[in-house]
Amino acid sequence: MKTEIIKILRNSDTYVSGQQLCNNLGVSRTAIWKVMNQLKEEGYEIEAVSNKGYRLIHSSDVISESEILSRMQTNYIGKKVRFYDEVDSTNLVAKKIAEEEESDGLLVVSESQTKGKGRRGREWSSDKGCDIFMSLILKPKINPMNASMLTILAALAVSKSIAKIVEKDTYIKWPNDIILNNKKVCGVLTEMSTEIDYINHVVIGIGINVNRTSFPNELASMATSLYVETEQKVQRAELIASVVKEFEEMYLVFLEIQTLQPFMKEYNDTLINAKRQVKIIEYGKEYEAIAIGINEKGELMIHDIDHPDHVRTVLAGEV
Ligand code: BTN
């Protein structure tokens, strides 16, 4: 009911009467009044005028289960949301839920993380109330060898959403860093539990630096936020819902074909490494090569610096 009330208030330019809400939702005036009070406590600014009704003045940047659900436009991913004020890591919470519950498509979101995990054992820093920390649980019936491609789709979903919401083009650094003005604005950490021939679950963790205004010294030269680059505050719930929608659209196609063929061009067009010399870090070894783009499996195609015909692929690693 809370989700419905938020939707009705957000979509109305004028006052919505208590009676109208009661009729639409089939509940009592007291029930409506209780929800209005909860919403105010969650940070919504709601004006109540006798004989007119309720009007949403400003929802600032509230993220809550109801706010996210009220914006979700998907068919199954993100239709169930678990929202927390603080967790160690949304990936850890998601993995636990995935082991214990029927949770395909469930989305975990938190206002902050105390032990945010980055790739390769690094930390992911958290600015409470400013950024996005989300993890999607998926249980795809696909070959486990193909699961790493989901990470590519997640990066593409974020870059498309940022382009729509803040109208800024981002680049992708293979496989899944989102770069804005040469600094990282988003990272994706995909973790999975598999048997040899089937996937128990995949958890796709996405961290987006959204409204934070500054970074600690050690990160300032590498990391940025949407706000720092655009001076625009973004409603995080809108961005979360958009990422999930963009992801779902591609994911449903991907499940059928299990290749990235339809998405390769769009990904390669935004690849920051394309045609550049990159340092490949693969299985503990480091070497230089020229990046070409991804193939339909999401592997990075590279060629030797001195031998353009000597093309190879990198499946896992970092550039
Ligand atoms: C990277 O190193 O680039 C990946 C960073 C991934 C961070 C996100 S934030 C939400 C989710 N929970 C985590 O602990 N990590 C991921």
Image (cartoon, grey):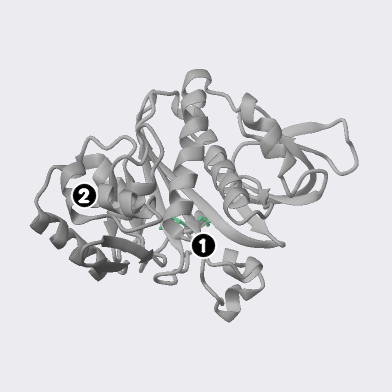
Which residue is at the far top?
Answer: 256
Mark number for residue 242? Answer: none
> Who's the residue at 46% across and 23% down the image?
255
Between 13 and 68, which is closer to the camera in this rendering? 13
In the image, is residue 29 above or below residue 124? above
Q: In this view, does 173 lie to the left or right of 302?
A: left
Between the C-alphas of marks 1 and 2, the distance is 29 Å
Q: What residue type is labelled 2?
A: Leu
Which residue is labeled 2 in the image? Answer: 21
Respond yes or no on whether mark 2 lies under 8 Å from ligand 1: no
Could you say which quadrant of the image residue 76 lies in? top left
Which residue is labeled 1 in the image? Answer: 234
Q: Mark 2: few, some, or many residues within 10 Å (few <14, many ≥20)?
A: many
x, y percent for residue 105 = 34, 37
Q: In this view, does 264 lie to the left or right of 247?
A: right
> Who's the residue at 59% across and 60% down the image?
185
In the image, is residue 39 above or below residue 220? above
Q: In this view, does 192 lie to the left or right of 5?
A: right
Q: Is mark 1 on a helix, strand or loop?
A: loop
Q: Is residue 127 left or right of residue 48?
A: right
Q: Do the residues labelled 1 and 2 touch (CB within 8 Å)?
A: no
In the image, is residue 36 above or below residue 157? below
